[in-house]
Amino acid sequence: MKSIYLDYGATAPVRKEVQEIVMHCLQHEFANGGSLHDPGQAARDRIEWARSQVATSIGADAREIIFTSGGTEANNLAVLGAARKHRHRGNHIITSQVEHPAILECCRALEKEGFDITYLPVNRYGQVETEKVKEAITPNTILVSVMAANNEVGSLNPIATIGELLREKGILFHVDAIQWVGKLPLDLSLLSIDLLSIASHKIYGPKGVGALYIRKGVRIEPIMYGGGQERGLRPSTQNVPGIVGFGLAAELISQEVTTEAARLTQLRDTLWKRISSEIKDVCLNGHPTDRLPNNINVSFDRVEGQAVMLELNRHNIFISSGSACSAGKHAPSHVLIAMGHKAEDAHQSLRITLGRETTREDLDLLVGRLHEVITYMRSLI
Ligand SMILES: *Cc1c(COP(=O)(O)O)cnc(C)c1O
């Protein structure tokens, strides 16, 4: 049976060109990038080339990129590192109720260190409003962290206007752009953003590698201590194959992002049109248009999301109930709760995320199966 992967929001397959270069590094370039001998220097050159590939893909300078072990570490380094470095200026931080746990849990940890955190509410589409950020600012505010695009419902946030507001007030702005990068174009030279997180595995690169963009002149503290790698901000021998693969993945995705965004938007809209016309009692979670090109999050009345997901899994169609990070736990999605859903409705959600390999035929098969599964499940009650 053909398998259909529609969970690109959780991770994406490593693209062919990237697999090849990663394999090449594993086989031939094992040296430590910190060694002064020739193989060490070759590894270092590869790391620096990857750094410029990642930087160019988001409109940054290579010196503004710090490689990390992934998206979670980039978020931790940004939030903990900025908060601790700038504590003398104030102890107030603003974030939103719909952030990824890699931000929310950092904020909870900072509360224990004496920081005061505002968790902003969102509108019914799951979006943070600039006006709400403005109202929450106090003379003690040192940092704001708002995601560019939500990983569960796909809604986009007004990061350009929030950035302008904060730049004017001299408050640091961190953006978790892990879902945005590779789905929509990003040019940091046009935005007032100080810190921004990216993860390689969401853009068809290898897992276990990511980056934090730190705008020139912005100071943060490390969260780990050791050797001086990554300007002392992320000590530890660099993951050369991972970094090299990430660099290539970033370059390749940035070349195709505009055409791919248009193609995915069309597929996404056709998918929702078909689901909403062929299956009764379904609603779309998140903003109807101001959302990621590859994300559809839906709730079917009277059926549990996880049951549908598992049933599709039996038919080799792979989607997600909520997000991958919360799917294991049986807690209702904090994102849907923040959007005003009741706990029982929040269990009905399903996330379908498309990617480079998704075709019209895949979605036809999905809609057919969904119709079958949902009709059956509803017939049981
Ligand atoms: C995937 C994801 C993360 C975590 O990234 P990892 O590389 O898995 O640690 C953080 N934030 C968002 C929005 C994500 O989608």
Image (cartoon, grey):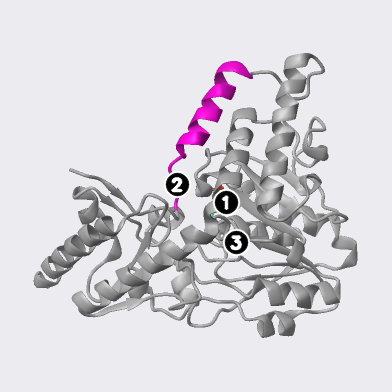
- Mark 2, Cα crowd under 10 Å, few <14 / some 14-19 / many 20+, is many
Q: Is residue 138 left or right of residue 43?
A: right
Residue 43 percent location from the top left of the image:
71, 24
* Chief secondary structure of the magenta portion: helix
Q: Is residue 137 left or right of residue 102?
A: right
CA separation, marks 2 and 1?
A: 17 Å
| 23 in the magenta segment | yes
Of label 2 and label 1, which has the lower sequence position?
2
Q: Which residue was labeled with disc 2?
A: 12
Q: Is residue 180 left or right of residue 115?
A: left
Which of the 4 image quarters holds residue 88?
A: bottom right
Of label 1 and label 3, which has the lower sequence position?
3
Q: Which element carries disc 1, helix, strand or loop?
A: helix
**Amino acid type assigned to the residue bearing label 1 in the image:** Gln
Which region shows up in magenta?
10-29
Of label 2 and label 3, which has the lower sequence position?
2
| 291 in the magenta segment | no
Q: Which element carries disc 3, helix, strand or loop?
A: loop
